[in-house]
Image (cartoon, rainbow, N blue to C red):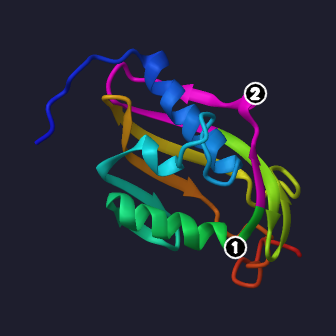
Amino acid sequence: MALTRQTMTDEQRKSVALEYLKAYDHGGVTSTGGSILDLFADDAQVYFPKWGLANGKEEIGRMFGDLGGRGKAITHDYAGFNWIMTGSDMFACEGTSHGEHVDGPWRAGVPEWAAGRWCDVFEVRDWLIQRCFIYLDPDYAGKDTARYPWLKP
């Protein structure tokens, strides 16, 4: 069991999550030139739809490599983030993104039902991400329409 070394404020926790999102947009490189994996605890967990649960930095690195191999570019729309802070280590951030995937480009709201809206649930303690569960539609190019009769491609 890890012991808490210092109490963090909501703003400090939010800054760790924001550094992670910006590093993701910059190919896994943080603002100080380090690896995105430096932002995670050794035993952290990350969940991504259709990939599953990655346990520990090695698996998280493999997951990010798998995901990065499918995406050409991503930009999170920072100005529109909704932060849901709880006063504890656990909090959420919802937002939108746009970019280009190997299957084609995407932008939140174009069309309205397609990819680009997401919500991440974080647990940040001791300046490290302990847990990040990512909730989004991984069909970035909106090609999975045949299974949903309400979608008219």
- The secondary element bearing badge 1 is classed as loop
Task: Tell which residue pokes out farthest to the bottom in this image.
Answer: 146
Measured as percent of width and height from the top left, residue 89 is found at 33, 29
Which residue occupies 32% across, 24% down?
A: 88
Q: Amino acid at mark 1?
A: Arg
> Which residues make up the magenta segment?
73-94
Q: Which mark is residue 70?
A: 1
Q: Residues within 10 Å of mark 1 (few under 14, many from 20)?
A: few
In the foreground, 131 or 60: 60
Q: Is residue 14 above or below residue 47?
A: above
Instruction: Determine whether, in the image, residue 63 is placed left or right of residue 70.
Output: left
Task: Tell which residue pokes out farthest to the left in this image.
Answer: 1
Instruction: Determine whether, in the image, residue 142 is placed left or right of residue 30.
Output: right
Q: Is residue 109 above or below residue 144?
A: above
Between marks 1 and 2, how big is the CA–CA gap?
26 Å
Discs 1/2, front: 1
Q: How many marks?
A: 2
